[in-house]
Amino acid sequence: MVYKLAPSLLAADFGIIKEQLAKLDEAKVPYLHLDIMDGVFVPNLSFGLAVVESIRKYTKMVFDVHLMIIEPERYVEQFAKAGTDIFCFHIEATKDAKATVDKIKKCGMKAAIAVKPATPISEIKDLLGELDMVLVMTVEPGFGGQKFMEDQMEKVKELVKLREENNYKYDIEVDGGVNPETIKTCFASGANVIVAGSAVLGAKDISARVEEFAQIAKEYNI
């Protein structure tokens, strides 16, 4: 699987967001991770459709939108129109995950499902063949700056095994507590899409950190 870095917009300085997006583009970063929080599914609030739509015109990065909201199926069409490329929702937040996946694909987006630390992969096993990506949360969703949960790598390894056994095509993404050390554990376990917030956008030299991560990925043949 191909390595893809997805810096988290939550870690950006919104006062200079256009400049930071330009730096990511210059560094040839492929994905931008956008965390949408509703204050219900998770305690915190973040940003919504208006921000997604407003920054879409400033970058060609793939918009990897992670919805930490209840009933995400209500907003599939709106996020598609706002410029979302990957629509990722939580299996714990919807009553009909299959219908939500179908709706996402009908709207022309890639479908991804996220699982919280307490949720086993068995909860999404029947849908794996239809997914473009699975997001394994390595922290509890809704808060930044948490410590990386290394035990979640067992889920990554399980997803790698299921993909190989069934010839599935999904990427495996990790989100939470990623830094130059924990990223090695992610790669060693089989993840190929890396969400990083302050480790990238909070770095003194964004381009240098992007290159550092890319070099580590090469060491793991990803």
Image: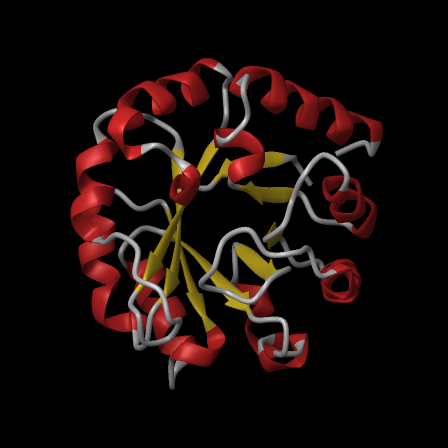
User: Is 89 located above or below residue 208 in the figure?
Assistant: below
Quarter-of-image position of residue 94: bottom left
Look at the image and tell me whether residue 210 can be seen: yes
- The foreground one among 25 and 3 is 25
Look at the image and tell me whether residue 33 can be seen: no
Q: Give the residue displayed 39% in from the left and 44% down from the top.
A: 10
User: Is 19 located above or below residue 86 in the figure?
Assistant: above
Q: Where is residue 210 in the image (x, y as percent from the top left)?
A: 59, 23
Q: Position of residue 211 (x, y in %)?
A: 64, 19
Which residue, as the protein is rendered here, is positioned at the far bottom?
95
User: Is 143 located above or below residue 116 in the figure?
Assistant: above
- Give the quarter of the figure containing the N terminus: top right
- The foreground one among 104 and 73 is 73
Q: Where is residue 189 in the image (x, y as percent from the top left)?
A: 80, 52
Q: How many marks?
A: 0
Quarter-of-image position of residue 77: bottom left
Name the colour scheme: secondary structure
Q: Give the residue displayed 41% in from the left and 65% down from the top.
A: 89
- Give the quarter of the figure containing the C terminus: top right
Side of 50 relative to 147 (left or right) = left
Side of 49 relative to 63 (left or right) = left
Quarter-of-image position of residue 218: top right
Side of 107 relative to 139 (left or right) = left
Q: Position of residue 18 (x, y in %)?
A: 27, 23
Q: Give the residue displayed 66% in from the left and 56% down from the top.
A: 147
Q: Give the residue displayed 73% in from the left and 66% down from the top.
A: 155
Side of 112 relative to 166 (left or right) = left
